[in-house]
Amino acid sequence: MSEGKDSLPEPAMPRAAIARRRQVSAYIFLPRGTRRTNVGLSASLARLLRLSVFGGIAAGFAGPVLAQSSVATPAARLFTSSEMAVFSVIIGVISAALLSTVWMIRQRGNIENESREIRTALSDANQRISQYQALIADKNRRIIIWDSQNARPELLGQLPVETGAPQDSEFLAFGRWLKSWSAGDLEKAIDKLRGNGQSFDMVVETNRDEILEAQGRISGGRAFVRFIALNNLRAELAELKIERDRLMTSISVFQNLLDAIDLPVWRRDVEGKLTWVNQAYGEAVEAVSPDEAVREGREFLTTVARERIRASTTPESPFHDKISTVVHGNRTFFDVVDVKSSNGSAGIAVDVSEAEAVRAELERTLKSHAETLDHLATPVAIFDGDRRLQFYNQAFVQLWELDIAFLEKKPDNSELLERLRSAKKLPEQLNWKTWKDGVLSVYRALDTQSDLWHLPNGQILRVFATAHPQGGATWVFENLTEQVDLETRYNTLVKVQGETIDHLSEGVAVFGPDGRIRLSNPAFRILWNITEAQAKPGTHIQALAEACAPSYDRPDGWKRFAEQITSFDDERPSSQGTLELYSNLVLDYAVIPLPNAQTMLTFVNKTDSVRAERALTEKNEALLKADELKNDFVQHVSYELRSPLTNIIGFTDLLKTPGIGPLNDRQAEYIDHISTSSSVLLTLVNDILDLATVDAGIMRLNYSEIALDDLLDEVSMQIADRLQESGVTLEITVPAHLGSVIADQQRLKQILLKLLTNAANFAPEGSTIELRCGREGTDFVFSVADKGPGIPEEIMRTVFNRFASSGKGGKRSGAGLGLSIVESFVSLHDGQVSIESQPGKGTTVTCRIPSAELPHSVAAE
């Protein structure tokens, strides 16, 4: 039996089973609402059944063993085989029962141990759940849990009261306790979380300006949104984040706003380079886009303006001034404001060209109005809303004879009236205060007030006072003294006028706009040989024309007068002319429009003066004809004399040559006299011919560019013999590089030679003639001065007349054409000639020759 017991696996197998059971026994904690299942107990029952079967099998193996042992002992022979089989079965059953009982006892202990472990684990889990719930229920956070899309969410925890978050189900109405932008962003994020599982982290702001952090997550098929009340650094960080988002939004809004406005705006870094510009800036610098303007560094302002801004701008004192620049090819004025900071600067430019133009126009208008008012004869004074003097004209000063210093202090209107009253320049009033209050009531009146002031000095003023809509008043003082005086003398003047017209030697008739005569004088009736009845007031001009027809009935007479007088044209021009009546009377007439559409006809008897004029005209025509004959004669004779003189001079020069033969002294002397006289005569003939050509208007100047230094050298060489003959010296004063002038070289040389010859003729022997030359712009100015006897005052007026010569003091007597030719040639050059002389002190002739332009044909060559 001991061996049988030792062979049974009863003690070992249950321990192994228990060990295995302990390895697999565990509690699975599911979320709230799930069932708990004791897995260890079910496994133990299964193992118990397996052990019972195993016990039966063991008993089955024990039968053969016992049978074998019975063969060895005598007692075994006492049992048959069937008994042994029954016995073996009984023993197996008993053994199985014993083993099952032992196993059940042990299993019960194990179950009790497992129950204790389960209760311990459950207690720990409950404790942890309590801790988690305590943690979740912290007053600084709240969690919303959604199990499904349509399930009502579960709320855990709470937020501080100062956040303003509701503690009940109204917590989900975010728009009631969160700011609108935070509520909108949060609802959009929750929709994405529940619909697409998109997590989020954001910061929201309550209506009480408290900052909360909202976190959205998906876990275990559920959607969680946790709200955390921030504090300390996290709250500060969240506030900074919100402030950053707010600032970024503001910056974006301002950039969009600056892009939308039509004002160039820019931003620069510390080095002055552009970092951002708006659309208007890009358009101003003609860039495709603002980014291109920044990338290419296109500057809106000039370099000088930018340097000026950089030099004068400080963080405490921004730059603000008007700067001009070119935009789209036009010079434009901008009001530029540039602000400097630690990381750069920013500026904006406002186009003030139109405002400047309007301001300038307003200033000009105000100045013009002020000047206009200042030149008015009507006194004007303007007071502002405080009743202080702001403007007055000269007529106002002259009317009241006030001190300018007092007026410049801008006195009050009441003070001004008191000043005038003390000077006894205002009308005397029984109740001064009431009168003054009535005068100053204009500042409270709606309509213009007017009044008559009778001043102590006898003047009568009509005073107009008009209140301004913005406050203040304008005072206008109309002096009626002269008007009253004129009205007083009006009747007397009318009578005097009638008497005057009646006694005029000129014929006068005045017609109304209806063409009927208003008045006429006796001279008018006498000139036209009509009666007083025919020209009585009210007679129509047609009837008057019929009465005057025997004297003159042509179309340029009364028919024309009738058209002008009865015309309906807005502008009635005046006209005048001459009529020669059938009676040989010559009348100068004038049609003069008068006010009120009236017309005056005047007739002046010009018969005697016309006759005298005709006689003078006939005489003048005869003189012109004689002058033409004289010019033709002089020109013809001059041409006829030139040929013989040229022959005489040529043959005289030929006789002087040695090849003809020797001449004795007397013959040589005669030949010299002939040569000299012939040259003088040829010069005279040439001068007369030149003057005749000038008078005939056919002389043409041959313009060319003349080197003045060469011209003076040539003149000095040609005049040398005459100077030596007269015993005088020529002194030429010329500045360096005199240049050139465009003129007729031949005529300019003649002018110089004539002046020098004339000076040499009158200069004392041994004296010096001065020739001074210079330039004034493009003009060539020269003067010839001598120390001769001078020109008497009575001859000075005729010194440029032809053939007006004075031989007194001269070495030779001439024809008197030199200065006349000089004046003619200078005038042809559009120049001027003047002469200064004093008896006994010499004469100075000054000429100014302007430089002309070369003809196109000459310039082309």
Image (tube, helix red, strand yellow):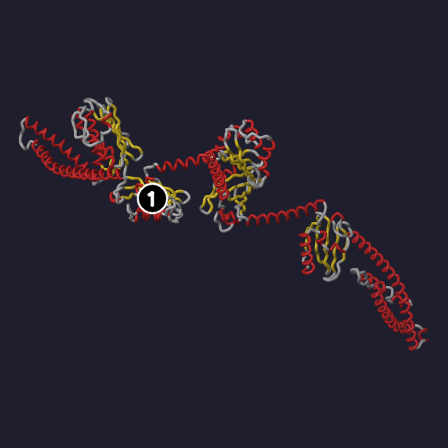
Give the camera-side residue of 837 and 207.
837
How far across and how far down the image is residue 822, in percent?
22, 33
Specify the quadrant of the image occupied by residue 834: top left
How far across and how far down the image is residue 634, in percent?
15, 37
Say which element carries label 1: strand
Is 786 left or right of 1, judged from the image as shown? left
Number of numbered discs? 1
Specify the quadrant of the image occupied by residue 832: top left
Give the camera-side residue of 788 and 476.
476
Specify the quadrant of the image occupied by residue 61: bottom right
**In this picture, is 56 found above or below 329?**
below
Q: Residue type at mark 1?
A: Ser
Residue neighbourhood size for the residue with mark 1, other residues' Cα within 10 Å, grouped as few (<14), some (14–19), many (≥20):
few
How far across and how far down the image is residue 417, in percent?
56, 31
Give the camera-side residue of 636 and 314.
636
Residue 540 in view in this figure = yes
Residue 694 in view in this figure = no
Q: Which residue is mark 1?
A: 575
- The quarter in which the N terminus is drawn is bottom right
How far across and how far down the image is residue 485, in percent?
46, 33
Give the camera-side residue of 767 and 354.
354
Is 337 left or right of 616, judged from the image as shown? right
- The quarter in which the C terminus is drawn is top left
Is 171 left or right of 50, judged from the image as shown? left
